Image (cartoon, rainbow, N blue to C red):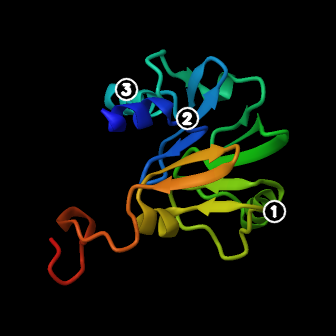
Amino acid sequence: MAGIWVMLAAPAPDLIVTGNGRHAGIATGHGMALLRHRAGDYMRTTLSELSGTDAEPLALADQPAAHCGRDMCVTVLEKGGRRWRIAATRSGYPVPWTSLVALCGRVDIMIADRRLPDACQPRWLKLDSAVLKRTGGVSIRLDPPMVRMVRQPGDRHPWSMTGQRGGR
């Protein structure tokens, strides 16, 4: 019974990123906006449920605070009296190195389904394939800033030990 109360009292995340970095959902005042709006039904349902809403997911590209192109999307969330700038890759195509590194320096959170260069240094959090391989998917609250990871340090579950001794 106490677990149910804790679950109900837990605040919904402001940002959800899948373990492969391909999909992200960003909370809006009207539900969850998806980085890749054409995601399949399973991913759309999963991200909506994880965000604590049953509303139909929105397209991030259609949100007023978002500026999206074919390969990248940048948006702003206002939380806790602060403007959080978030950028994410949207396609598998390479982004010019100098543009990518410059963008990283202007955002608080950078999300990518590929490895980002070491020179990519966002102000707060870099979630690229190298990081997500260690953490699995993440959910983020921005007020106060908090990151929850699927994989926790010391996990010994067989499905999280791929490539390790004793894993599958």
Quadrant in the picture for residue 65: top right
Which part of the image, by quadrant, shows the N terminus?
top left
* Amino acid of disc 1: Gly
Please state the horizontal and vertical placement of residue 19, each as a whole percent of the image: 42, 54
Q: Is residue 39 visible?
A: no
Q: Residue at x 43, y 52 (%)?
A: 137
Q: Residue at x 70, y 43 (%)?
A: 143
- Give the side of residue 78 with respect to residue 113, left or right: right
* Whole-percent x, y for residue 106 in the image: 83, 56
- Disc 2 on helix, strand or loop? loop
Mark 3 residue type? Thr
Crowd rating for badge 2 (residues with CA inside 10 Å; few <14, some 14–19, many 20+)? few
Q: Where 37 falls versus 131 (above or below)?
A: above
Q: Report the disc number at residue 158.
A: none
The first of marks 3 and 1 along the sequence is 3
Residue located beneath label 2 in the image: 11
Mark 3 element type: helix
> At 72% from the left edge and 61% from the top edge, which residue is drawn?
124
Residue pointed to by mark 3: 45
Question: Callout 3 environment at 10 Å: few (<14), some (14 to 19), or many (20+)?
Answer: some
Q: Which residue type carries mark 2?
A: Pro
Q: Which residue is mark 1?
A: 105
154 to 84, vertically: above or below: below
How many angstroms separate mark 3 from mark 2 (CA)?
A: 19 Å
Q: Mark 1 or mark 2, which is nearer to you?
A: 2
